[in-house]
Structures are given as C-alpha cells and as structure tokens.
Image (cartoon, coloured by chain):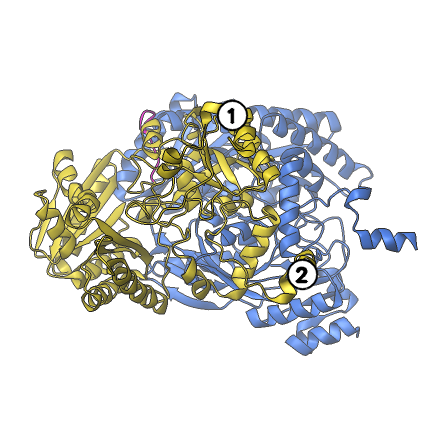
Chain colours: A blue, B yellow
Amino acid sequence: MSTLARDLAAQVGPSRVMVRPADLASYAFDAFGAAGERHLPDAIVFPGNTDEVSAVMRVCAHHGVPVVPRGAGTGYAGGAVALGGGVVLNLCRMTRVLAREADAMRVLVEAGTITAQVHHLAAAQRLYYPPDPGSAPTSTIGGNVACNASGAHHLLYGGTADYLVGATAVLADGRIVRLGEGADGGAELLRLLCGSEGTLAVVTEVLLRLVPAPATRATLAAAYDGMQGATDAAAALVAARILPAALEVIDGAALDAVAATGADPVAPGAGALVLVELEGDATEVAAQVAAVRTALEGAGATRVIAAEDEQESHRLWATRKAISAAVAAVMIGKVNEDVCVPRDRVAELVTVARAAGERHGVPVVTFGHLGDGVVHATFLIDPRRRGDRERGDAAAAKVFGAVLDMGGSLTGEHGCGYVKLPFVERQLGEDTLRLMRRIKASLDPRGLLNPGKKIPPAPQTPAEVEPSAVEAAAH
Amino acid sequence: MSTLARDLAAQVGPSRVMVRPADLASYAFDAFGAAGERHLPDAIVFPGNTDEVSAVMRVCAHHGVPVVPRGAGTGYAGGAVALGGGVVLNLCRMTRVLAREADAMRVLVEAGTITAQVHHLAAAQRLYYPPDPGSAPTSTIGGNVACNASGAHHLLYGGTADYLVGATAVLADGRIVRLGEGADGGAELLRLLCGSEGTLAVVTEVLLRLVPAPATRATLAAAYDGMQGATDAAAALVAARILPAALEVIDGAALDAVAATGADPVAPGAGALVLVELEGDATEVAAQVAAVRTALEGAGATRVIAAEDEQESHRLWATRKAISAAVAAVMIGKVNEDVCVPRDRVAELVTVARAAGERHGVPVVTFGHLGDGVVHATFLIDPRRRGDRERGDAAAAKVFGAVLDMGGSLTGEHGCGYVKLPFVERQLGEDTLRLMRRIKASLDPRGLLNPGKKIPPAPQTPAEVEPSAVEAAAH
C-alpha cells in the first residue's frame, strides 16, 4: 500500500480506501465514458462525514495529489473521473438526513443523498423539491449542486441553485466553511459553488428550501408532423402567458426508438411529440388544461391527448423516460450532447443535427426541455466499430458550431466536465476565462481540485510562467 | 481641476464629472447616513454606457483611486458612500432598455434603470418581475443586484438572484465580461456578483427573467392582540401548506405611528397586524382566501378583513407602505435594523427589541416580512440630541446579539455596507472570511472596489504584511 493510501486509511479506516486494480477500474469512467474512455484513479476514498472529508483533503494536500469529488457518476461530461490520476473522493456513504425542518420548509441532507430521496423527504411532509434531473433515481444531491442540475421542471421552478439556501463545504486545504442560511453571509459564495463542478470546493452538506406540494397535476401530449410544430406550440403557450411546470419535446426518431423496444410511443409515426405538465390546485389546473389544449391545437397538432388520471399521466411520461434505455437498445454507444438555444430555434437546431448525422453517417435522436430550449441531440454510434466515435464527434461538432452561432450554450444542464472543455474558450471569451482562472487560483492555488474540468488551463506564455519555473528550467 | 478629474472628464465629458464641494456633499451619504454621517468623495462621475464605465475604471486604476458604484443611494447600510474618499461611480444615467424579449420572457436593461420601471416593462407585456424592495419607486436594478434585494414577495418568488440570468460587468482593471445567458458559462460567476455590493465588479447591464403575470390578487389583513398571534398565524399557514405571495407583519407601535399621521391604520389599537397577499388565477385565489381566513382566525385573530377589490387591497397595503414616512414624522432620526430570524421566533425577537428600547430609553417600531422572518426593528432617535444615536446603537447591538443567538442573520435584505461590518466576523467565522478575502483579492487585488464594505479587512499580522511594505517600513 502506498504512503498516500496508508495516510488516507489512517483518517477514514482501511475498509474505506480502495486501491486494488479491479476497484480502480470501476471508477475509471462515468456516464459519459461508460462505453469508452478510461481514466484510472490512484485510489478511491469513502469518507463518512464532513470531518472525514476535511481530513482526506488535508492528506491529499500534503501529498500534492488531485482530488476528484464524485457522487453517483451519472454525469455525461466526464466531470467525475480522475483525468490524470489522483484520489476519487466518493461521497456515496454520506446519505444522512441531518434535519427535517417542515416548519421552515427546508431539509438538510448530506451530499451523497440520492436526489429521489430528497423528493420523498419533501413529499412525506406535503412539500415539494422541484428539480428533477433525468438521473434523479440514482444521482446524488451533491452532484446536482456541482452541476447546478435541473430537469423537466426547470421551466416553472428553476434549477438546483434556486433551492440551495445553505451548504457546508470543504476547501482545498481542508478548511470547513458553512455558507448561506443558518451560517448567513457568504450567500454569494454559496451561489459561486453551485455549478462549479467540484473545482472550487467539496460540498458535503446541503440545505434545500422546499415549496408546498401542488394539489393536482395534469399532463397533455400533442403530436405534430415535425419539429416546427413543436416550436410553434412553445410559442403559442408563451403568447397565451402560460408557463407549464414542464414542456418537453421528443422527435420522431426518438419515438421510433421507443416503439422499437415494444414500449408505447403514445403517438407512433408522429414527427414530434410535445408533453405539457401543469401543476396547481384542481380548478386552476382544469382551466389551464383547456387553454393549453387550445394553444396546442392552434399550433397544428394532429392529435392532443389529455391525461384524465394519474395512470394515464404516467403512460404519457413513460415515453419520455424510456428514451435513454430505448436508444441504448438500438445502439450500444452514443454521443449525448446537451445544448441550449433560444426556444424559438429548437426546430432549426434539430434540422442541423439531422443534416450533420446524415453527412457523417450516424443516426441522431433528439429530445429535450422545449420550454427552456435545452436539446439533447444524441448521435448513435457503436464504439467497437472503427471510426464510429470520430464520426459521432464530427457530427456533434457541427451541432456545437450551430449552437454558438445561435447565441446558445454548450452546457445545457450536464455541466462542462472535460468533454466540453475545448469549446469553453470560444463560448466564454478570454476575459471571462481569466476571471474564472483567478477565482480558481484564489480557492485552489495548487490546482488540486478536479483538475482539467470546467476551466481550461491558461496558455503558458513565457511571461506567465512562474519565475521559479523559469529558474528551474534554466538550471 | 485635479489630474484625476481631468482624466475622468476626458473619458466621459466634463459635464459628467462633479468636483465642486456642494456636489460632493450631495453624495456624502445614502439612506443610512441621511440624518448623520458624511463621507465626502473626491469626485462623482456619470458614465453613459458600459464602455464609459470601463474607461472610468481604467482611469481610477491608473490613479490608484477607490471606486464606489452607486445607484439611487437608497441603501440602509452605507454601501454607496466613499468611506475614505475616492470616486463615486454613479450609474443613474444608464437607464436604457436594451432588449424587450417577450417571447423569451426576459428583459435586458442598463443597471441605472429604476426597479419600478422594470415592473412596468414586464406588466406592459403581461409579464411580472416579482422582486419589490420597499424602495422600488426610486432604487436602481443595479443596486438591487448589488444587494440581492428582495421585498414582500420574496416568500413565494425569491429575490433578485432568482431572476438575474445574465449581466455585463466591468472588472477592477476595466475589462468587460458578459456572464450568464446569452454569454453562457460563467453562470456561477454571475451568482457570485449578485449580493457582492460592488466589491468585486461593477454590474452595468442586467438580463432578468420574467414570469407570467398572475391574473388575480387578493389581500387579507388580520388584527392580533400581540406579536405572538402574528407568529402563530405564520405557523398556521405553513401547516396548511399555503405559501402566500406576501406575508407581512406590523407591530402595534408602527400602527400607532401611522395613526398619528392621520393615515388609516386599518386596525387601530391592535397589537399586531398581519397582511397576506395571494396571487394566481381567480378560482385558485378564491379558494385560498377561504383557507387563509380559516388559518388566520384559528391563530386567534380579533378581526380579519378580506379586500373585495383592488381599491380595498390598496387601502390595506397603504398601512404597510406608510410606516417609513410615519416613523420619520414621529422622530427625525432612526436606527433602522434589518435582521432575519427563524420565522417562529419573530415574536421573541420583537420582545427583545422592545426590552432593549425601554432599557436604553429609545422607542422602537417593528415590522417586516413575517414569512421570511425578516424583521425591521427601527429605533427612533433624534440625532441632534446628545447621546441619542449611542442609545439607539446600544439597543440595536442587543437585538444583533439576540439574532445571532437564534442562528439568524444580521443582513436580512439591505446588505452589509460598512454599517454591519463589525458584526460580520462574529457571524461568518474566520474560515469563511478568509475565503471571501481570497476571492476579493483575486478580482480586485489592489482593493479599489468599494473598500471598507461587506468584507472586513484582514488583521495585519507581521507575517501577512507584504514584504515591500516591511522593507519600506525598515528604511
């Protein structure tokens, strides 16, 4: 056992440190690299509480070893893998509910708590935690904070940052800070950490605000001949000043993939399916259902289905939730892109993605959060087939270019990780990048926290090389 | 004219730079120091756009002169005054609406835009901008961003940070960065700036998301014998899982002050008045009015008034809005404290404030956002009377101590400025403070941006003094 592993074991116990090759291999990828890239860490450590995280950080700082915080590894951007080695700091054991504050409509949980568990905790008190990333049954709340995750309900309710009101975080040097409500002050530091992908600090405890649970939900599905109809539907809802809880879109290729698995695609053969979820009290929702139906039909829907009960509602949503598995059944690999464009240009982007897929010979399915303009364009590849990943990447690059030309964003909701790093510079510009690097350097001067993610390294020009490095090179 | 003033005039035009003593005197205070302290700036400059702000920052950086960004000066914490001299950067000319994006439900305005103007812009498109600080008719949106201002509707809708989706900011060295939507990435940097009180950058353009305007509003007022009744009312609403758009409280002393001006106090002689505002569609609001009335009565209300129309609703709110003027009519000075405690301890805090006022011989009125636990305990003083301000400060210190003991916050919504600086260290702890200082140093290494505000200076221990300073002292 290495000195590093021994020092880690001294802090958290030998059973909480993994260094065997088979174990390391299990943490060499996340959802992005599931069918491809491997990056072996030097060790995986499983702290049990904030103090142990602090102790681990001190050990890693002492050894000068990078630390990669990790939740459930459901990210699609490679954010939770140790690119050049280092210690994977796995928070999955930290799942305690530290306080149920129904009166204050808050809940305090450890960062390893599964997102769905937060939903259950809220529901048990007739409260509601709206952010619902697709991976909620397995993702951790700490990972959600790291990526500022959102999901289908972002349109009405916002994302994780809108519910994060306090946190405990461990800094690169092992210091523990408490930010936001309860600790007060530092609210803007708390907001800085949300979305920083573990590059600035490790969030270990999360205080979330909750809202009253809506009394009623209703779901409508509308079939269109093509994506333009879906875009028109979104515009019609905005024009009617209706902000649904969720407004999703699924293209014909994704519907076909679902149908191919034998699951119910709701509207077989449609060019696009729009899902609308409404939440509120019974009378309000009933009135909205009527108005939404009018708007959907006005946008040229070939068919509108309004779920009459919860079971029917589940059936409509099942199509949306079946896509990832259906896509995996069609093709074992995928280049899953997560971009965001102005809502009225979703159809245009889907056209670009299809053209790119045809040009490079890779099928593409698209679906996403129509209301927010978040599109998941998924190119289907077989990584065992020579050149397939390259063809998928080339098609994705065309999509990225179109997104930037539209003034959109390349990180809709999955974070940047290392996968999107090459595009960050073009997107952000040099001054904003310099700002990010300065803040990074102030919090993590040695660059030990999740290196190679989110923040592109500064180009090393002679003037920027540290004097000591220059001296060392001269000797 | 000094070299500094000449250099500034070269950038923005001589008519946009003020250096005459009479002008300087007009900017020597904000709402906090209106009846007291004066801090003369060296110059006031009125840039007309982001590029001019950048040019002003470069001039000030060249001269090594502090810069104090200022909106309407409505802050109660001294955040907009030049403590040790320097340039007041007044953004009041920057009031352009840069984009009305009704389809995207956003609006892009310059930072000097009056908050109420944002409300009007939204309403003109059947949209809604919920944050509504009491100073909305005069405060600027840039000042709101600097303080992460909120207001009566925070309970349901959140504060400025929850609507700020993009910004243009000028850094201490004059560089311009665009953050958030449109520019993408940097969303967590955007969140860092919101609430940083002009200590990290100058926000010059603000992109706000809007929400659909509620179709109906209803207001209820409930009178109680004392503050405990108001606290019970808040608990009853939470237990019924009703989250009103606003939940306000006014104590008996504040009601008396309003009555003394001849204005309608709604419930003369009551020990506390609770205001509840509901928003939504007509049927939903009607159902909620009934449920809220039940909850208010269950908490022991001696009287409940439900506004039947908009005029009656305005009458109920007029009491709340009349307090500041009424207090000023009773006594020319005030120590206006803005604290936040857990919602169920509001009555307890008011008891502490009253005892402190009696002990030190200063009357106190309290009111605030009951739903959020934000209490404005206002000690009435006459600054011309010897010892009155000291007595007010001593009483306020007792309130601050009680707030911290309750796990509350000393900056409910007005920011920290320099007024609350002495309390920040006790509230935040050394590690969080160090974190704030490191981020401050990374963005503003020379400490030129609004010095002496929000972030307490580091204690100068020999080890922390810069080598050059030590050398200079040794020679």
Of all residues shown, which one is farthest toward the right?
A: A475
Report x, y in % for residue A218: 35, 41
**Residue B124 falls within the magenta-colored stretch:** yes
> Foreground: B188 or A344?
B188
Residue at 52% from the left image edge and 26% from the top image edge:
B9
> What element does badge 2 sit on?
helix
Left or right of residue A445: residue B301: left
Report x, y in % for residue A319: 51, 41
In the image, the segment drawn in magenta is B123-130
For the question of whether residue A219 can be seen, the reply is: no
What secondary structure do most residues of the magenta stretch adopt? Answer: loop
Residue at 25% from the left image edge and 36% from the top image edge:
B281
The amino acid marked with disc number 1 is Val
Residue B470, numbered label: 2
Residue B12, numbered label: 1
- Determine which quarter of the picture holds residue B93: top left
Q: Nearer the viewer, mark 1 or mark 2?
A: 2
**Chain on which label 1 sits:** B
Q: Is residue A3 above or below residue B390?
A: below
Residue at 66% from the left image edge and 42% from the top image edge:
A434
The earlier-in-sequence mark between 1 and 2 is 1
> Foreground: A38 or B87?
B87
- The Cα–Cα distance between marks 1 and 2, rounded to whole angstroms, is 39 Å
Crowding near the residue tagged with mark 2, few <14, some 14–19, many ≥20 C-alpha atoms within 10 Å: few
The amino acid marked with disc number 2 is Val
**Chain on which label 2 sits:** B
